[in-house]
Image (cartoon, rainbow, N blue to C red):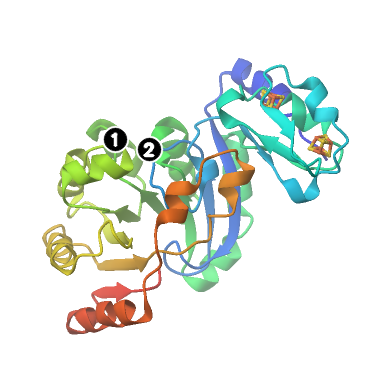
């Protein structure tokens, strides 16, 4: 059944219930914590990593995705768009100019071929928990649970904290995948019912961090220090050629991991899972395209470097 996003949004806002904007429930995930998990992805992120594999998470509310391959060139969406954000290319396929889009979603209703779809839907805590509890038998049988990821879940603190609280009441293992970029009172509130933190460190130099990701790193490192010993932590470092592929910095991050009593430190070389999404969201993906891949020799060098860290440092898989 097609959900009228705008109507649902209006009804829920008026109901006064705690709600959040979610863009995916991914079942049977094995990369976001132990065992089989369902990962709930929420919208909104204060960082702008050029290699983000979930670019649909960055904008904090609804947005549209226009997939050229599905477009039949009927022109119905162009008729309803009041901002001129949509046009046709020389093959009569849809082109989205994100800078002109006001996210009204009128084109989603106009397209009969699902070439334009809405990303994100508002859900109540009860609806989210109902969805997440569906796979409880799998969590129980595999030592898995639920992970909340994004985007940055700390941007929807009331909703995320309440979902975690309900899951804990139902005996579900909980994990938060986070950049750690938020005020401490928010971090404290959201992590209250979290069993495992998947905590990203992307660069130790604050100036470089800001230059590439849009924000400084001090608050991220301060929050990490405050979280030490309070819950289980896995540090995660996305390794990106030309940004943080620096063995000395990697060693310092491993040291930080030990200081904050992290159980594991993951180094995850760049992948290109999200690259194809940029165009359909109307984003400029040129910064992503400019990042080169690691060579096989470089990957071997990194693997060799981490051999001495035994099982504490894991290279290449989440
Ligand atoms: S969502 Fe954007 S592209 Fe679609 S009709 Fe509204 S302004 Fe135009
Ligand atoms: S309504 Fe759908 S199929 Fe028709 S031009 Fe727009 S995107 Fe293409």
Q: Nearer the viewer, residue 20 or 81?
A: 81
Q: Position of residue 101 (x, y in %)?
A: 62, 25
User: Is label 2 in a helix, a strand or a loop?
Assistant: helix
Closer to the chain start, of discs 1 and 2, is: 2
Residue pictured at 42% horizontal, 41% vertical: 153
Residue pictured at 20% horizontal, 48% vertical: 224
Q: Residues within 10 Å of mark 2 (few under 14, many from 20)?
A: many
Q: Position of residue 232 (x, y in %)?
A: 27, 59
* Residue 40 appearing in the image: yes
Quadrant in which the N terminus appears: top right
Q: Position of residue 111 (x, y in %)?
A: 82, 35
* Residue 169 appearing in the image: no
Q: Quadrant of ligand 1?
A: top right
Q: Are marks 1 and 2 in contact (CB under 8 Å)?
A: yes
Q: In which image quadrant can residue 293 be found?
A: bottom left
Residue pictured at 30% horizontal, 67% vertical: 267
How many angstroms separate mark 1 from mark 2 (CA)? 7 Å
Residue pictured at 47% horizontal, 70% vertical: 35
269 with respect to 17 (left or right):
left
Q: Nearer the viewer, residue 88 or 243?
A: 88
Please give the residue where the numbered disc 1 appears in the rendered image: 182
User: Is label 1 in a helix, a strand or a loop?
Assistant: loop
């Amino acid at each position: 059944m097609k959900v009228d996003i705008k109507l649902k949004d209006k009804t829920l806002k008026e109901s006064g219930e705690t709600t959040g904007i979610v863009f995916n429930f991914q079942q049977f995930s094995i990369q976001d914590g132990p065992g089989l998990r369902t990962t709930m992805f929420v919208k909104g992120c204060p960082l702008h990593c050029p290699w983000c594999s979930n670019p649909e998470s960055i904008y904090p509310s609804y947005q549209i995705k226009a997939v050229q391959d599905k477009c039949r060139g009927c022109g119905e969406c162009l008729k309803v768009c009041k901002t001129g954000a949509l046009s046709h290319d020389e093959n009569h396929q849809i082109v989205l100019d994100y800078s002109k889009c006001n996210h009204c979603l009128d084109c989603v209703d106009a397209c009969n071929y699902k070439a334009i779809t809405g990303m994100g839907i508002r859900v109540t805590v009860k609806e989210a928990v109902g969805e997440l509890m569906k796979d409880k038998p799998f969590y129980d049988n595999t030592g898995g649970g639920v992970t909340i990821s994004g985007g940055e879940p700390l941007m929807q603190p009331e909703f995320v904290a309440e979902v975690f609280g309900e899951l804990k009441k139902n005996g579900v293992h909980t994990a938060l995948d986070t950049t750690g970029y938020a005020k401490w009172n928010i971090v404290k509130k959201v992590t209250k019912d979290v069993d495992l933190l998947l905590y990203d460190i992307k660069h130790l130099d604050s100036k470089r961090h800001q230059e590439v990701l849009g924000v400084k790193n001090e608050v991220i490192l301060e929050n990490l220090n405050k979280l030490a010993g309070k819950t289980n932590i896995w540090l995660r470092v996305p390794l990106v050629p030309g940004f943080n592929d620096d063995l000395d910095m990697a060693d310092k991050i491993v040291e930080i991991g030990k200081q904050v009593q992290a159980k594991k430190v993951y180094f995850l070389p760049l992948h290109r899972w999200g690259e194809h999404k940029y165009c359909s969201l109307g984003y400029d993906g040129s910064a992503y395209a400019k990042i080169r891949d690691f060579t096989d020799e470089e990957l071997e060098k990194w693997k060799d470097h981490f051999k001495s860290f035994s099982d504490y440092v894991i290279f290449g898989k989440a």
